[in-house]
Image (cartoon, rainbow, N blue to C red):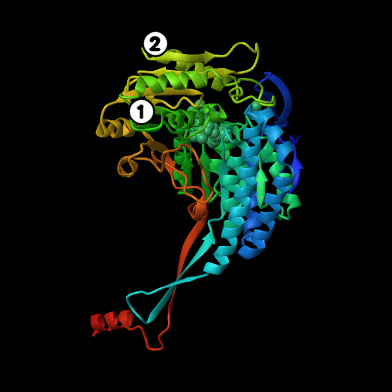
Amino acid sequence: MKSELFINGAWVAAQSGGMIDVIDPASEQVVHQIASAEAADIDAAVKAAKSAFDAGTWSGMTGAERAIVLRNIATGIEARTEELARLEVLDNGKPLPEARWDIEDAAACFHFYAGLSEELDAEGAQNITVSDDRFTTRVVKEPVGVVGAIIPWNFPLLMAAWKVAPALAAGCTMVLKPSEVTALTALELGDIAQKAGLPDGVLNIVTGFGPSAGQPLTEHPDIDKLAFTGSVTTGSRIMQSAAKDIKNLSLELGGKSPFVVFGDSDIEQAVEWIMFGIFWNQGEVCSATSRVLVEDTIYEKLVARLELEARKITIGDGMDEGVLLGPLVNKSQYDKVLGLIATGVEEGARLVCGGAHTDIGKGYFVAPTIFADVDENSVIWQEEIFGPVVCLKPFSSESEAVRLANDSEYGLAAAVMSKDDARCERVAHALRAGIVWINCSQPTFVEAPWGGYKKSGIGRELGKWGLNNYLETKQITRFDDNSPWGWYLKQAEDQTG
Ligand code: NAI
Ligand code: MG
């Protein structure tokens, strides 16, 4: 397990010597320590990224040359899947099979952007026709420069891949700050990237707390672009930092994603997608299926089926075989989620099952929690809980379902289920969200754009949209005519003449 900062291709201690405890959320034990970077370390990391960018060791390569390194990173991750997955479980708590899935997806993300990096070469300059044919104009894409990427704790290596792969594919250099809660796999990524042939200084990885390490990164004048995933509160603060120097910015923030189930749906299928949508990754998912709207004709039946299945879920240490729900990531998330469950009870929602899971005696375990008959104006219906807590509410018409689904300050994802295709299409268009799933919930593909409406963020990750996040667009216009242009001289002549 690494503990130092990765700056300019070297592993270095934080200048202050400060360290952060790494806690296994299943045992509540301190299992390791990582460096706590502060402004001086951030400055060193940004300087390394800036000199690497200016030297052109990476930005000056062809896309095909960069693709070779990106594929090496992908295979480097693949070769260590089991080890990385176990680090993820230790750090985050998620069940091992889910962690393996994350690591495979992270590798796939590097493979995908290797391909897009090659396509950048093939695309080349795009000629466009302008309204004066004495001029020719072409448009070229260039890396945006030095990127500061700040990521959360719910999918540690995968969130790193979503930022690092497209930024590197574009030719950017960067400083990555993982969450202080789950930095172990991001640090290994530094080692993997170096062995893959990534030049020194191109990817720097600094661990540290939000205020002391994240904030100086967002304020650093040599950062050209900030890419953030996390809470709305921190996203808003980062936007304010970005405003000072007009930094390019993309934000992937929270959600309160609705799932609309019409009465003609197969209840078994609906229950399975809801279970996956809210209990996968302990519900610590930005797109989690946290608000379920069910047509009144099948509402009680669905609530009962969901309860039956939720009670069957095996809760335990993510390392143990057969576990489907691990502990929440840390004490503060555990307290936050239990606090919101208590709020839900106070607000008068029907607690069908769930709450703290104390059988194990240690660890931050919350049982699958179901609230029915939740009021649309209640805190638990409106606020992101980020835990295994689902809120259900009946509806009686399509227009009511759409109104309730859209009544949120968030707009990341939404889902609709019905056997009536036309209705699904209508509702899919009416839902104000960046991602809409029909007859399913949560499947995420590296090829497809990911991001939110409203307070859920700005910009899109993944696919070619994710690459565009890290590219500047430049027009190059030339005057191809041998005759004089004549405008300025003619004006001057008219004035004096
Ligand atoms: P957070 O948004 O504060 O943390 C995310 C990242 O931002 C971490 O790397 C953190 O160190 C960094 N950060 C914190 N303050 C910063 C600052 N002032 N400047 C720069 N970087 C800063 O989220 P946190 O505190 O870990 O979780 C709080 C809540 O946020 C959760 O309960 C959940 O509701 C939500 N959340 C949403 C996520 C999503 O994917 N949409 C991911 C993680 C949390
Ligand atoms: Mg931890």
Residue 127, relative to residue 326: is it above or below? below
Label 2, residues with CA under 10 Å away: few <14, some 14-19, many ≥20: few
The residue under label 1 is: 293
Specify the quadrant of the image occupied by residue 454. Answer: top left
In the picture, the disc for residue 117 is none
Per the image, label 2 sits on a secondary structure element best described as: helix
Q: Quadrant of the N terminus?
A: top right
Residue at 27 percent of width and 80 percent of height = 491
Amino acid type assigned to the residue bearing label 1 in the image:
Leu
Horizontal side, residue 414 vs residue 1: left or right: left
Asked whether mark 2 and ligand 1 are closer than 8 Å, the reply comes as: no
The location of residue 93, given as percent across then percent down, is: 64, 26
Q: Nearer the viewer, residue 289 or 338?
A: 289
> How far is disc 2 from disc 1 in space, using C-alphas?
21 Å
- Label 2 vs label 1, nearer the camera: 1
The answer to whether mark 2 and mark 1 are in CB contact below 8 A is no
Q: Position of residue 56 (x, y in %)?
A: 64, 62
Question: Residue 485 in the image: x percent, y percent?
Answer: 35, 83
Q: Residue at x 56, y 55 (%)?
A: 145
Of pointers 2 and 1, the one earlier in the residue sequence:
1
- Dividing the picture into quadrants, the one containing residue 243 is top left
- Quadrant containing ligand 2 reads top right
Residue 39 appears in the picture as rendered: no
Compared to residue 219, the image places residue 285 above or below, namely above
- Element class at badge 1: strand
Q: Residues within 10 Å of mark 1 (few under 14, many from 20)?
A: many
Left/right of residue 35 with respect to residue 383 in the rendered view: right
Question: Which kind of residue does numbered mark 2 sit on?
Answer: Glu
Left or right, 233 with respect to 206, comes to left
Q: Is residue 20 left or right of residue 166?
A: right
Name the residue: 39% across, 13% down.
350
Residue under pointer 2: 346
